[in-house]
Image (spheres, grey):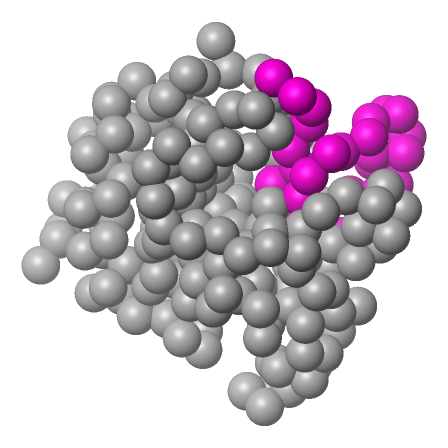
Amino acid sequence: MSDFQTFIGGIFDTNAYLVKTRAGEILFDAPTGTLDWLEREKITPNLLLITHGHIDHIDDAAKIKKRYDCKVGCHSDTVPLISNPDFFKQFGFFLESEPVEPDFLISEGKSQEFLGSSFDVSLVPGHCPGSLCFFSNEQNLLVGGDVLFAGSIGRTDLPGGNHAELIENIFKKVLVLPDATTVLPGHGPVTTIGEEKRHNPFLRLRG
């Protein structure tokens, strides 16, 4: 049985998820307004994991790290996006967020422990370099960032995006999960692997 809460924040309606583990609460991503939500609900996150470094997913990350003294983890390819305040300006994007330095880096691999619970971590670039998906076999839950949505996939027209790479990675690393797996996407409603296999038009048009 999955045990999570959802917050939707920022101008892009970005999802943050709070997932309960054996030893505390993991917050996945930190869109604008997440800190206010945590304080309002009297929630104390013990760990912040970043699925990828796009601004709409990390805008409150520095504030949350300071407020709760919680560790922040991400992939090495994500570090320049979240630690350099001028990173996106070179591509003509002028949205700004407070930079945050990760406390540890996360690589692709099976059975990685976060707060006493095991997650299989997959590196799934194509939408954004360093995109990570976190799968809990115990909860049959995938925190997928902007890789796979209900009826859609992550956009690939931003810097570092690659449509063919994203599709290939989805088939190799995401759709191999059980059909009943609950998918928590970075935007939009919750879905399942089976639902997307059957009805997602971007996946049926592969190739």
Count of marks overlaid on the render: 0
Residue at the spot 70% in from the left edge and 65% down from the top edge: 101
Does residue 158 show up magenta in the picture? no
Res 150 seen here: no
Asked if residue 178 lies left or right of residue 15, the reply is: left
Asked if residue 175 lies left or right of residue 110, the reply is: left
Quarter of the image for the C terminus: give it.
bottom left
Residue 206 in picture, x, y percent from top left: 13, 53
Residue 161 in picture, x, y percent from top left: 37, 71
Residue 63 location, quadrant:
bottom right
Picture layout, residue 174 above or below residue 84:
above
Residue at the spot 67% in from the left edge and 44% down from the top edge: 48
Residue 19 location, quadrant:
top right
Picture layout, residue 119 above or below residue 88:
above
Residue 133 in picture, x, y percent from top left: 41, 44
Magenta residue span = 22-48
| Residue situated furthest top in the rendering | 1
Picture layout, residue 21 above or below residue 173:
above
Residue at the spot 59% in from the left edge and 90% down from the top edge: 90
Residue at the spot 76% in from the left edge and 33% down from the top edge: 45
Residue 204 in picture, x, y percent from top left: 14, 44
Return the residue nearer the eye: 84 or 167: 84
Picture layout, residue 139 above or below residue 207:
above
Does residue 44 show up magenta in the picture? yes
Res 133 seen here: yes
